[in-house]
Amino acid sequence: MKIRYIVLMFVLTSFLCGNPLDIFEPYMGVIWEGHYQESEDSSLTHFIYWEYSLDSSRVFQIKTVPELDFKMVTTYYMDERWKELASLTLLDQNTYAVGYAHKETNHIEIYSKNYHLKGFHETISHFELWKGNLIDRFYRKTEGNWYLGHTIFYKALLISEAFERMKGLEIKQSVILEE
C-alpha cells in the first residue's frame, strides 16, 4: 500500500509541477524574423527560434543575423542545485553568458552575466508575445543602472519561408563580400 501511495504522489507531483521549460512553449514551432526598432541597424534581419532537446531536458534558443555572420545559442535547463531555470549562452567573438530565466506575468525574463575578453557585463532580455508578434527588449547594466539597449520586433514565419529568406540573405552577403 505504501508503494502505491508513493508512486501516486510522484505521478501527481510530476503532473502538477510540469516541466519548468514549458515557459518557452508559446515561442516554439515557428522561426521568428525581426528588425531593430528606431536604429541605424534596422535593416539587419534577425532570426530566432526555440526548440526542445530530444529528451525535453533542455530548451535551445538559436539566434542568427546572417548579414553579420552572427550566431548565438542559448541552452536553458533546470539547475537542481539552485532550483532555478539556468541558461548558458555561447556567442561569437569568444563571448559566453551564464544566468537564469523565469516567467513574469506577460513575458519571460532572462538575466545573464556576459563574459568577454575585456571582462563582463550584466544583461536582461525580455521576450513577450503581443498580438501574434514577439518583442525582444534587451537591457544592459552600465555604472550600476539598467538601460534599454535595443528592441527587436519579430513576426512568425513558416519554416520554409524562413529558410528561403535566410538563403537570400546569404547570397546577398556573398555578393557584397566578393565585391
Image: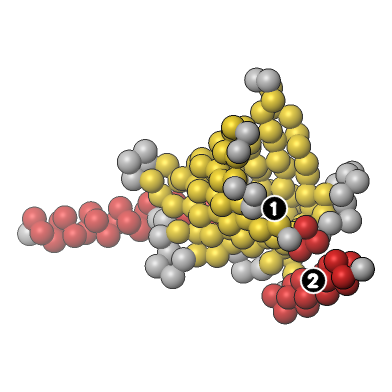
In the rendered image of this protein, does residue 157 appear above or below residue 84?
below
**Left or right of 80: which side holds 141?**
right
**Disc ID at residue 129:** 1
Confirm whether residue 102 shows in the render.
Answer: no
Which residue is depicted at the point 74% across and 49% down?
135
Dot 2: few (<14), some (14–19), or many (≥20) neighbours within 10 Å? some
Which residue is depicted at the point 49% across and 52% down?
76
**Left or right of 79: which side holds 172?**
right
**Disc ID at residue 5:** none
Alpha carbon distance from label 1 to label 2: 28 Å
Q: Which residue is mark 2?
A: 170
Q: Label 1, secondary structure: give it.
A: strand
Give the residue type that dot 1 points to: Leu
- Which corner quadrant holds the N terminus? bottom left
- Which corner quadrant holds the C terminus? bottom right
Which residue is depicted at the point 69% across and 25% down?
142
Confirm whether residue 15 shows in the render.
Answer: yes
